[in-house]
Image (cartoon, rainbow, N blue to C red):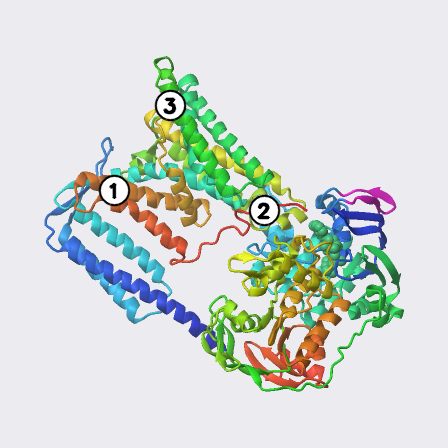
Amino acid sequence: MSAGQTSKVIDKARERHSLVVGVILIVLAVFTAWVFGYGTVGDATFRLAMRGDSFKVGDLVVPAAPYAYVVAAILAYFGARLMMRSGSRRANLILGIGLILFITAFLTWATADHSFSLTGMLKSTIIRALPIAFGGLTGVLCERVAVINIGIEGMLLAGAFSGVVFGSLFGGWAGLAGAAMTGGLLGLILAVLTVTYRMDQIIAGVVINIFVLGLTSYLTSQVLAKEAFRHLNDAPVFRAIDIPYLSDFPIIGPLFFQHNLFVYAAFAMVAIATYYLFHTRTGLRARAVGEHPRAADTLGINVFRIRYIQVTVAGMVAGFGGAWFTLGSVGRFDENMTSGRGFIGLAAMIFGRWHPVGALAAALVFGFADSVQQKMALLQTPIPSEFLAMAPYVATIIVVAGLVGRARPPAADGKPYVKE
Amino acid sequence: MEVELRNITKRFGDLVANDEVSLTIQPGKILGLLGENGAGKTTMMNVLYGLYSADGGEIFVDGKPASFASPKDAIAAGIGMVHQHFMLVPVFTVAENVVLGVEPTGALDRLDLKRAREQVRDIGAEYGLEVDPDALIEDIPVGLQQRVEIIKTLFRSAEIVIFDEPTAVLTPQEVKEFFQIVRSLRDAGKGIVFITHKLGEIIELTDHVKVLRGGRVVGEGDPKIMSQVELAELMVGRPVDLVVDKVAANPGKAILEVSGLKVLGEGGDVAVDNVDFDVRAGEIVGIAGVQGNGQTELIEAITGLRSVADGSISFEGEDITHHSPRQVHALRIAHIPEDRQRSGIISDFSIAENMALDSYYEDRYGRGVTLSWPQINAQSAKDVFEFDVRTPTIFNAASTLSGGNQQKLVAARELSREIKLIIASQPTRGIDVGSIEYIHQRIVAARDAGVGALIVSTELDEIMALSDRILVMYRGRIVKEFAGGGSDVTEIGMAMAGVAQ
Ligand SMILES: Nc1ncnc2c1ncn2[C@@H]1O[C@H](COP(=O)(O)OP(=O)(O)OP(=O)(O)O)[C@@H](O)[C@H]1O
Ligand SMILES: [Mg+2]
């Protein structure tokens, strides 16, 4: 096996990959020119300034049709280049840039002859990404110790519910504590079922979801709806806190530094989780438990204890995140108000390759699609906004199926540990 | 540090794996543990390491009674173990694996990887165990992985180091280095336990040997004054033939023909590169080579487990290049896979179920969609008996068998049916001499009955003993061919190392 031959085979795989990416880019180019460019009139006006900014930045005005043609040309150029000089190492990077360009062209086309607040949309991206990020982080923490948590949805919902009840009774902070405790309790139950009793992890998670959905729906419609208990579903909402100085910057200020506690907490938790998993002693042990529990066991590491603690803490993260639905947003609970965000969190975990930062990034992608969809509905584009809502999940399926590179879960993921 | 195990008894249900076994591990001495498959060697060491709790008996450390409820206690007492199946996290680096459980830390629980790396280097320098602390375990060869395991025990300042069949996965060169390391550990005053099935290794390396059979100590002695034949007899309880008896082959026409075969490895690299050879009926062809030179991929390609990139494979004139494993199996080709745990057995299934695993769809095991359990059980019982698989019943899960008995189970399934060609990778890995004798006899008998055989083994002795023709594989190519009997071992060894090119 000569070195030349080896690299030839690798080249072949890369060649095919480049070819695929090249074709995708050409298709996008044609689509951009035809749909976004041809016959489009008017300028797209993106407002960058937000109300209350201390100094205003001007609007971004883009002529829609020319912009689409420029993007189409760039896409076509890169696509053709990849197809001809195939075997490029940067195919994925180029694909990423191409997709971003495509999305900007799409936005410009949709906004032609209208105007909308770009900063506002990005800000709502962050907010919409929030519960998904909490869910994804919960998933990362659980699966890193090899416990699959399908019950994230239920944990978010339970957090939202207990958050509002405790919040209504004792104030916002108590609501937060109650939500985290409830989530932690559900995490503990999951740990008992899967770690000690080695119940099928998928089923255990589904049971938690159904249980929480049933219980909270019952309590909402039968108890909280009653006049005597209505005050239990009326909690104070955490208001936005402006970070001094930083929040005064144009664009960046409103985007990142004028949020409520939950947003800051999410970023902090992702940072802490990353530090914990990859830079601490306990994190190393936890990852060992997720990859090769028997090895950890033979080194005197208590596999069961680490799984219990980490799954419980993950549950607390989910409970806390769930409280955002009520305490961070509307102050009242509605049946099934999490509407699947927990499951999307799981997708974010996979998309983010079982890394906290990756999960957050994936959550932002999902949040972006969500907020674009919202805007599109307002702008009344001919594309049904439901299609846009589908986009991130199609992307997830592609990622998980391995087109953009293999994502590898922890080796022992989903397997109970049996001591002999 | 001296450790004494006194009258240790360990039961698994009705099965007595250790029956009042006593042994002493002395500092600066290498104790060899010898015994048939299922004799209870691993169990005994797992008791000492705190993985199993004994049903009876005591442990003394330097004369004082001790009890190990978990590996943690055993490690704290200075006991280290290099397991039969390595206990390393593949996606961690060498340094991370070494320090796992006793990590150097800074403030805020911060992992001090810099210090970990230094510590690994220090131990490496002290005992001559060089490894790159930043390499990922999955990227380094087994020989180095074993080094990491040894460093792990030393890092925990082990005074007693247990090696459970450490040489089973090593190449001859690696074995040499390994022996050097073990000797230097002994000279540093460590007590060593060394478990193996290779009698030559016992004689070469150990200072004292204990022989176990059926969970009991049946003999001990000074290996320096014992011969392999004596040891083998003590171990099996009857005289054993250590050389394979066989008459000259009488090959017929070629049944398996491989030409221009090219197969890709896991990472898309060329693992098998333009290989041509054939196997004739009534002939045993051995493929020698250091592990990882394309043998795995070659066998997987022939048996339909891996797709072929180029070239062709034919069996009795029929093109089988793109046959599925089932189709290959139906052509009466037996396959003993290299890794029994990964592709030989389903460990949660019973022994009988494992026996029927390959032919459950055949008429002899059932009609239509129903299985005929009486038939399956009868056949399994017969095979288990014939191949001496040590188990209380055929209804036990395959996972409860000892390592060597799992291997015998696979051999029994594959060799007991009517076959035309045997394809076997490491057919006797981890098996005791008595059973090796039997499996070798079966293969030779099959050959004499006109069956062709392709044997892959990293064990040069095995290749030399069995083969009528020897092919040496190096970097995906067949670099040299030797005649079976009387070829020069050193010459083959050199070809295996790629020198002959
Ligand atoms: N977890 C278990 N459950 C039930 N039986 C077991 C278990 N582990 C081992 N045994 C049985 O105990 C006996 C001793 O097994 P052990 O693994 O100690 O053998 P060994 O001497 O190491 O053999 P080998 O050389 O094949 O590795 C065997 O009969 C085996 O089937
Ligand atoms: Mg063993």
Label 1, residues with CA under 10 Å away: few <14, some 14-19, many ≥20: many
Q: Secondary structure at mark 1?
A: helix
Along the polypeptide, which appears first: circle 3 or circle 1?
3
Rendering coords of residue A208 (x, y %)? 47, 34
User: Is residue B283 toward the left or the right of residue A126 in the image?
Assistant: right
Q: CA distance from mark 3 to mark 2?
A: 40 Å
Q: Where, by quadrant of the figure, is residue B498 drawn?
A: bottom right
Which amino acid type is marked by label 2?
A: Val
Task: Assess whether residue B330 is covered by the magenta stretch.
Answer: no
**To which chain does the residue with label 3 belong?**
A
Residue of label 2: A289
Using the rendered view, name the quadrant where residue B58 is placed.
top right
List the residue tagged with mark 1: A373
| Nearer to us in this view, B135 or B89 | B89
Left or right? Give the position of A293 relative to A104: right
The residue stretch that appears in magenta: B54-68
Residue A101 position (above or below residue B326): above
Please state the chain letter of the residue tagged with numbered disc 1 in the rendered image.
Answer: A
Eye-nearest disc, 3 or 2: 3
B62, above or below B129, in the image: above
> Circle 3 sits in a helix, a strand or a loop, which is it?
helix
Q: Secondary structure at mark 2?
A: helix
Where's residue B63, x and y in %? 88, 46
**Does label 2 lie on the same chain as label 3?**
yes
Of labels 3 and 2, earlier in sequence is: 3
Ligand 1 is located in which of the four quadrants?
Answer: bottom right
Which residue is at the far top?
A: A228
Q: In the rendered structure, the residue with mark 2 lies on which chain? A: A
